[in-house]
């Protein structure tokens, strides 16, 4: 594919997004931006959340991951299913009962000022890092296949991407994103299905025969029973469960879409529908990865980095139409990573740190102006982070993402668990120190785990250890509430 054609595709897709934005952002206000005026249809949210949950990380990294980890990631996905049930039955009723705009306001009500700021601060840190990684992945592919051909530097590419995200989320916020996610999910899933078909043609074998070959091969290995192994199936399952609870249930970006539903019953319908579909979609991505690996082996293609597996084969070996399909899917995966993160971070800073939802000393017009400034500031931080990550592309992005999540979402897991399952009153001023010390201890445990625990190596389950340490610290500096 020529760089010019890829750029034209990108511009056409962006024009579609802006068409949706124009329709949904009319007469939008701050409540539209933050919670969509609580009028989002649950089935629209459920379908759109598929694309938002998968993003560019799943689209690029999961297929490439199959080469090294087979289907073991599917055990993590099964853990996701249980995690989503906990969110729907435990966390969402709490958020709706308290009528929260930012879910971290709960920490203020339960513990106090410093606990509230700590929880919101850890979300902002984690979401900034995670979203920047996801955006970098997609921007880097566009750089390699489009902008390098015209000698356009990486920072210009990144700046263009960030400006586009700012423009279509600036006014409508979550009300716009709920509907643009539909477009993005549709094109992403279509790209995966069509890619499978084109690989089947490239190998000159029917799709169903390829599915059969994969299920009979070592590539489909799902359950690893060696407890020393970093992908031991029980570790994978419980890690998936708690990663979902934290990265969705305790994440403002994902919960903001759920809180835009009309009521708790519709929000729960959305969560159960979305989580069931997501299991099958992730399985499809794993099969796609296996197809790509089989194709690279049969054609003698050397792919040094796992994240390069899908783009290299789709663009260079499957023909122009398959390359076109991949680019559309990649673009569809890119925007949900950025728009939801930008909106949720703007919401968290505006509500949790600036208190725009309860300030009576400013007019609505001034509050909107402050939100605009926060929006632009968050976008600038994204831009700087992407430039930093462009110098650190040394391992699979999905691995980085979950590693970051284990260290930054762990304190949130400990805080919410303590709040929900105990009636003790914490020493609010000590909370920030506990939340910082817990990840630091986890870094030490992860570094020296094999020496300390007879060869045991921590994986994604580090989020459980992190949450437990935070919970224990809160307990030690707490007292019974009168």
Image (spheres, rainbow, N blue to C red):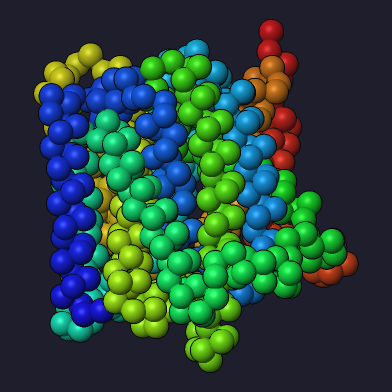
Tell me what residue is drawn at x 68 percent, y 13 percent. 481
Q: Is residue 216 above or below residue 341?
A: below
Tell me what residue is drawn at x 62 percent, y 23 percent. 90
Furthest toward the bottom, the residue is 300
**Location of residue 283 in the rendering, given as x and y in whole percent from the top left corner:** 59, 55
Furthest toward the top, the residue is 482
Quarter of the C terminus within the rendering: top right
Tell me what residue is drawn at x 35 percent, y 38 percent. 344
Image quadrant where residue 158 sits = bottom left
Tell me what residue is drawn at x 71 percent, y 21 percent. 422
- Front residue (pair 173, 466): 173
Image quadrant where residue 74 sits = bottom right
**Residue 461 showing in the rendered view:** no
**Residue 22 showing in the rendered view:** yes
Q: Is residue 430 above or below residue 209?
A: above
**Location of residue 452 in the rendering, given as x and y in whole percent from the top left corner:** 83, 64
With 388 as the anchor, is 80 left or right in this view?
right
Image quadrant where residue 313 sits = bottom left
With 228 as the anchor, is 61 left or right in this view?
left
**Location of residue 352 in the rendering, given as x and y in whole percent from the top left corner:** 38, 30
- Front residue (pair 39, 338): 39
**Location of residue 475 in the rendering, given as x and y in whole percent from the top left corner:** 72, 30
Quarter of the N terminus within the rendering: bottom left
């Amino acid at each position: 594919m020529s760089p010019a054609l890829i750029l034209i595709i990108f511009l056409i897709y962006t024009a579609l997004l802006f068409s949706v934005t124009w329709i949904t952002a009319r007469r939008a206000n701050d409540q539209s931006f933050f919670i969509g005026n609580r009028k989002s249809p649950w089935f629209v949210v459920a379908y759109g959340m598929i694309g938002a949950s998968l993003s560019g990380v799943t689209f690029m990294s999961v297929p490439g991951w199959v080469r090294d980890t087979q289907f073991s990631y599917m055990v993590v996905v099964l853990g996701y299913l249980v995690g989503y049930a906990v969110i729907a039955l435990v966390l969402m009723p709490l958020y709706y009962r308290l009528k929260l705009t930012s879910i971290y306001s709960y920490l203020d009500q339960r513990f106090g000022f410093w606990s509230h700021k700590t929880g919101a601060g850890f979300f902002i840190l984690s979401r900034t890092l995670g979203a920047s990684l996801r955006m970098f992945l997609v921007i880097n592919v566009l750089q390699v296949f489009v902008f390098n051909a015209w000698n356009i530097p990486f920072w210009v590419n990144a700046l263009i991407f960030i400006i586009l995200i700012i423009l279509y989320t600036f006014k409508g916020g979550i009300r716009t994103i709920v509907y643009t996610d539909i477009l993005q999910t549709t094109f992403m899933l279509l790209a995966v299905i069509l890619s499978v078909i084109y690989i089947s043609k490239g190998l000159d074998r029917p799709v169903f025969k390829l599915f059969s070959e994969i299920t009979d091969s070592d590539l489909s290995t799902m359950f690893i029973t060696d407890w020393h192994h970093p992908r031991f199936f029980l570790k994978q399952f419980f890690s998936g469960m708690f990663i979902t609870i934290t990265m969705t249930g305790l994440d403002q970006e994902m919960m903001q879409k759920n809180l835009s539903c009309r009521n708790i019953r519709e929000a729960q319908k959305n969560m159960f529908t979305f989580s069931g579909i997501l299991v099958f979609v992730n399985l499809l991505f794993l099969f796609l990865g296996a197809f790509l690996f089989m194709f690279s082996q049969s054609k003698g293609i050397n792919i040094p980095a796992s994240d390069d597996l899908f783009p290299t084969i789709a663009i260079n070996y499957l023909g122009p139409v398959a390359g076109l399909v991949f680019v559309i899917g990649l673009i569809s995966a890119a925007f949900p990573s950025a728009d939801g993160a930008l909106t949720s971070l703007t919401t968290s800073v505006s509500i949790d740190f600036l208190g725009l939802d309860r300030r009576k000393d400013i007019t609505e017009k001034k509050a909107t102006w402050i939100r605009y400034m926060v929006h632009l500031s968050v976008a600038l931080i994204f831009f700087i982070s992407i430039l930093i990550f462009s110098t650190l592309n040394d391992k699979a992005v999905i691995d980085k993402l979950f590693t970051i999540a284990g260290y930054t979402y762990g304190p949130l897991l400990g805080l919410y668990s303590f709040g929900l399952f105990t009636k003790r009153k914490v020493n609010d001023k000590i909370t920030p120190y506990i939340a910082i010390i817990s990840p630091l201890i986890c870094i030490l445990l992860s570094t020296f785990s094999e020496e300390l625990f007879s060869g045991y190596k921590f994986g994604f389950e580090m989020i459980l250890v992190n949450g437990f340490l935070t919970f224990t610290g809160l307990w030690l500096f707490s007292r019974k509430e009168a």
